[in-house]
Amino acid sequence: MIIKPYGYAIWEKMQAALDKMFKDTGHYNMYFPLFIPKSFFSKEASHVEGFAKECAIVTHYRLKTSPDGKGVVVDEDSKLEEELIVRPTSETIIWDAYRNWIKSYRDLPILANQWANVVRWEMRTRLFLRTTEFLWQEGHTAHATEGEAMKEAEQMLNVYANFAENWMAMPVIKGLKSANERFAGALETYCIEALMQDGKALQAGTSHLLGQNFAKAFDVKYLTKENKLEYVWATSWGVSTRLMGALIMTHSDNNGLVLPPKLAPIQVVIIPIFKTAEQLALIAEKILPIKKALEAKGISVKFDDRDTITPGWKFSEYEFKGVPIRLAIGSRDLENGTIEVARRDTLEKATYQFTDIENKVEHLLELIQINLFQKANTFNFNNTYHAENWEDFKNILNTKGGFIYAHWDGTPETEQKIKEETKATIRCIPLKNHLEKGKCVYSGKPSTQKVIFARAY
RNA sequence: CUGGGUGUGGCGCAGUUGGUAGCGUACUACGUUCGGGACGUAGGGGCCGGAAGUUCGAGUCUUCUCACCCCGACCA
């Protein structure tokens, strides 16, 4: 996947917002190697099992000119003593280091994060949602107690939910993964689940309570105040460039991308309508102070005064790109003291008086941010169903899609069978769930609460 | 790996019974345009995925090969 400049600018805005949230909650960044010795992997049994089938492996370190003189071939003499795995995630290499970093309760907690690329050799890729290489951040924390680790995992889940809802304008459900869907090597996996406009669910972020699994696998122990040797408790948590896919699939319409103002690389585009250089000069004279005033408020503004492209073309182009607000100004406006304001979320156009325009625009950006969230929230509400029996369940799934609340007997076997028959999986057991007795939608066995099913990406 | 399909200018495609390649779009220049993806004229750009073969002659026929796409197991 190539991420072109405009797309990468969105990722940078995401990174900046998330990075600040991490730092505000006491975390710091670090960086670990891309290549992980194969032996590290085998140390945590379920972790290997989870990732073994999708690893890229480095076996040699040198090329040589092909015997026939055309191109290059692998130099068999450069075979590595031990193969290196291109990280699919970094738990193993990080916990190998933590063993040396952690000796005493005074060394805890470790609250580290890294921004990195990872590789998972998937059978089928899907742009942004599932690419062989993707960019992400992975937090890896170490704690003295289970309670503290649990609090950390929950805290980071809340950070992700906050980011999704208040920055991406994407409503999410916070929940717990079932055993089948849990991260390889975790005791519990928390997640935020989002619903895309086509009715399919998307896991948008995860936060894991790793327990002492990695501490035991990598022998990471610390001395307590009481001088007792204990294993360390761990968490890990991550979000990736998949969020770009989520952003696109949550808000876009038939005219292209729709970006929430808080993540839009360009928040306001100004398009002058002119024929001659003199007219452009007059417009620029009027509009550049407004641009400055907007920028002083921290709003990113682009004044597109290219004379090689028609205004109509520019209108369409910035609609494709999802720019939240477009201002258009021509000589008619100059005479009337007006400006045309178009919002991307509703596609509405209005003529505003020029006075106080920067405050009106600032306010409109806030409205758009809120409107996008509400629109998505309404969509989620309208596409959330309750299935009381198996027929209902299949019907809803096949005709409507969306989130389906249904009773489940709590066994991996039932979940597996439902998946095989319908391709729907348990997205999560919502944290905000009311317990209610019922019968499993599939097996009819007793159940204590409904969980969320959906077909997912 | 299981089935099906496609490879021809940057992109999307056409190409008849074999006669050395064309359309749309994009690109360049000039002119007229410019308040919702303008128009005209003139240009530039392709050893037709690769190799071998049949033939006077292959995008087209034959054989081999490579790559990609869709369907299945996997997944942030």
Image (spheres, rainbow, N blue to C red):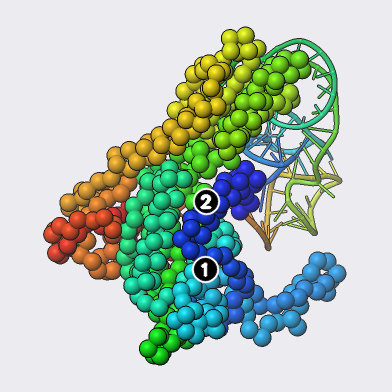
Answer with left or right where residue B52 lies relative to residue B35: right
Q: Nearer the viewer, residue B20 or A417?
A: A417
Residue A455 is at least partly visible in this image: no
Indicate which disc, 1 or 2, sits on the residue closer to the N terminus.
Answer: 2
- Label 2 secondary element: helix
Specify few, some or many for label 2: CA neighbours under 10 Å numbering under 14, 14-19, or 20 or more: some
Residue depicted at 17% across the width and 62% down the height? A448
Position of residue A360 relative to residue A9, above or below, is above
| Label 1 packing within 10 angstroms: few (<14), some (14-19), many (20+) | some
Q: Chain of mark 2?
A: A
Q: Which mark is residue A112?
A: 1
Q: What is the tally of numbered marks visible in this picture?
A: 2
Q: Nearer the viewer, residue A309 or A419?
A: A309
Q: Quadrant of residue A178?
A: bottom left
Q: What's the mark number on residue A207?
A: none
In which chain is the residue bearing label 1? A
Image x and y of residue A168, in percent: 46, 45
Residue A43, compared with residue A166, is above or below; it is below
Q: Residues at marks 1 and 2, common chain?
A: yes
A146 versus B27 height, above or below: below
Q: The disc labelled 2 sits on which kind of residue?
A: Ala
Local SS, label 1: strand
Residue found 72% across the figure and 27% down from its top? A306
* Residue designated by label 2: A17
Does A8 sit left or right of A276 as displayed? left
